Amino acid sequence: MNKLNKPFTAQEMGGRTSRYIFYQTDEEIELFVFVPRATARADVTVSIRPNSLTVALKNVPGGPIIDNGKFYRLVDHRECHWQLDELPDQQTLEPGNYDTANCVGGRGDQKCVWVILKKKERTQRSGHWKCVCVGDDEIDVKKFGPQLVEVGEDGQERGGRER
């Protein structure tokens, strides 16, 4: 529960790095990679594998924005997708100020590559992803509370263990 004694939102369970912003639910990660306003869909290359992500722009110096970034955990790459979206002026992509239908947020001079990642395994509470790509800034998932432990018909615990 957050400070208002309500369940955490996807935005509150997300984070920010110098390359992207992400939000997460139990089943998905939404990743927003900022690109220049002049970027066209044909300029963007996105490769989503079960354990890694590449986001690159053609004819842009400096190489890929995310170069074969190893995911914190596996994704179901067949269920993942991406799109290029506009960012309206005078909005910030911050928790509580976001609308998935319009990719609201960011900076007026930019667009974003909006990537939806389907988690291979559902997560909850402190079991959520600490980051999208290993080595990036991590969020404190302990604030989301301890994981719930499922008990199967055989009486054995399933999942929910701290790592």
Image (tube, grey):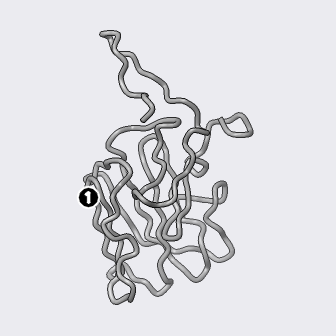
The residue that mark 1 highlights is: 49
What is the three-letter code of the residue carrying label 1?
Arg
Q: Residue at x 38, y 70 (%)?
A: 66
Residue 51 horizontal/vertical position (percent):
28, 54
Give left or right: position of 108 versus 50: right
**Numbered disc 1: secondary structure:** loop
Q: Which of 130 and 104 is in front in this view?
A: 130
Q: Indicate the quadrant containing the C terminus: top left, top right, bottom left or bottom right.
A: top left
Residue 60 horizontal/vertical position (percent):
38, 88
Residue 38 horizontal/vertical position (percent):
46, 87
Give left or right: position of 68 versus 65: left
Q: Is residue 157 above or below residue 117?
A: above
Q: Which of 73 and 49 is in front in this view?
A: 73
- Number of numbered discs present? 1
Q: Which residue is drawn at 35% across and 23% down?
A: 158
Residue 101 horizontal/vertical position (percent):
52, 60
Question: Which residue is at the far top?
Answer: 154
Image quadrant where residue 105 sits: bottom right
Give left or right: position of 99 versus 84: right
Q: Nearer the viewer, residue 126 or 99?
A: 126
Q: In this view, does 95 lie above or below 84?
A: above
